Amino acid sequence: MTALLLRRLGVALPTLLLVSMMVFGLQKLLPGDPALALAGEERNPEVIEYLREKYRFNDPVPVQYAAWLGGLLQGDFGNSVRTRLPIGTMLAEKLPVTIELAVLSMLIALLLGLPIGIIAALRRGSALDYGASLFGLAGLSIPNFWLGIMLILLFSVHLGWLPAGGYVPPSEDLWGNLKAMLMPALVLGTGTAAIIMRHTRSAMIQAMKQDYIRTARAKGVKERKLVLRHALPNALIPVVTLGTLQFGELLAGAVLTEQVFSIPGFGKMIVDGVFSRDYAVVQAVVLCTAAVFLLMSFLADLAYVLLNPRLRT
């Protein structure tokens, strides 16, 4: 286990360094001058020059990168050029919102994907199996932004059951928070549920074909126990690994959903940063997202080792 941790750490640090270089370098290729965007409509030449000096836009790109990386190693993400707030404080405010959305989405995905996948595998070739395949195809094909708009039209405009957007902190109103997060969680959860369903179905079909299943069935083990005690734990090994990585993707891929529902999370933060040429914010968000992906990848490997006794040696 210690060797696994050291190997993953040895891969994570160079990966984060490479991601930081790519993000920093690619942003410099974006069209437009960030100093002009920050100067306002008047675009006073003195103000523009002051902004270029203040944010080191006149320095060579390697010098800018070295200065940013040096501050990052000291725990300083810098300040947002748009809000003038410390980026570390902004991350601390936005990250819990996105984590809550990702947790609710993954919970919906598991509640939908696992049972449907198991039933589809056990009733292979039946109408239930074809219905599950249709659900999976729809979940993978329907764009998140379109599904979000349709849910707003149905549950907010026509029925009036749920708010159309916004965010309420759970510390202020827990019920209001759940009502505000339900639709965006459904939007993200259905797509992830389709992926989990397809993998669960495939893994269960393979598990039910194994020799130990035929042996247990020949010994008279009841079908319910056969599925829940023998086939399912082995079939869930790749599904747990996939689910861990999907959770990392939910943390990073909620940009459109957060925009549609006006949720002040990581997705909205990075979109605002791109449009306002707030390079430091974009760099910090992307780097944190990459770190989360690497953490989820490590947890997936760890879960695979814990669930598969043959790998513990």
Image: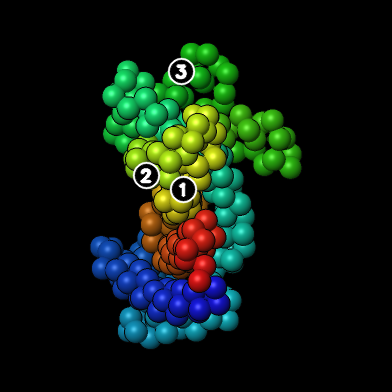
Q: Is residue 125 visible?
A: yes
Mark pair 3, 2: CA separation: 46 Å
**Residues at badges 1 and 3 in contact (C-beta under 8 Å)?**
no
- Residue at 37% x, 25% y: name it: 123
Q: Position of residue 11 (x, y in %)?
A: 41, 76
- Residue at 50% x, 71% y: name it: 313
Q: Is residue 261 above or below residue 31?
A: above
**Disc 2 secondary structure class:** loop
- Residue at 25% x, 63% y: name it: 31
Q: Is residue 30 above or below residue 240?
A: below
Q: Residues within 10 Å of mark 3 (few under 14, many from 20)?
A: some
Q: Position of residue 13 (x, y in %)?
A: 45, 78
Q: Residues within 10 Å of mark 2 (few under 14, many from 20)?
A: few
Q: Most extreme residue toward the front, as rendered?
A: 219
Tell us which disc is closer to us: 2 or 1.
2
**Left or right: where 7 falls relative to 205:** right
**Disc 1 secondary structure class:** helix
Residue occupied by mark 1: 234
**Residues at badges 2 and 1 in contact (C-beta under 8 Å)?**
yes
In the image shown, does 290 or 172 lie closer to the viewer?
290
Residue occupied by mark 2: 210
**Left or right: where 260 falls relative to 5:** left
Residue occupied by mark 3: 154
Check disc 3 and give the amino acid type.
Leu
**Residues at badges 3 and 2 in contact (C-beta under 8 Å)?**
no
Tell us which disc is closer to us: 3 or 2.
2
Check disc 1 and give the amino acid type.
Asn
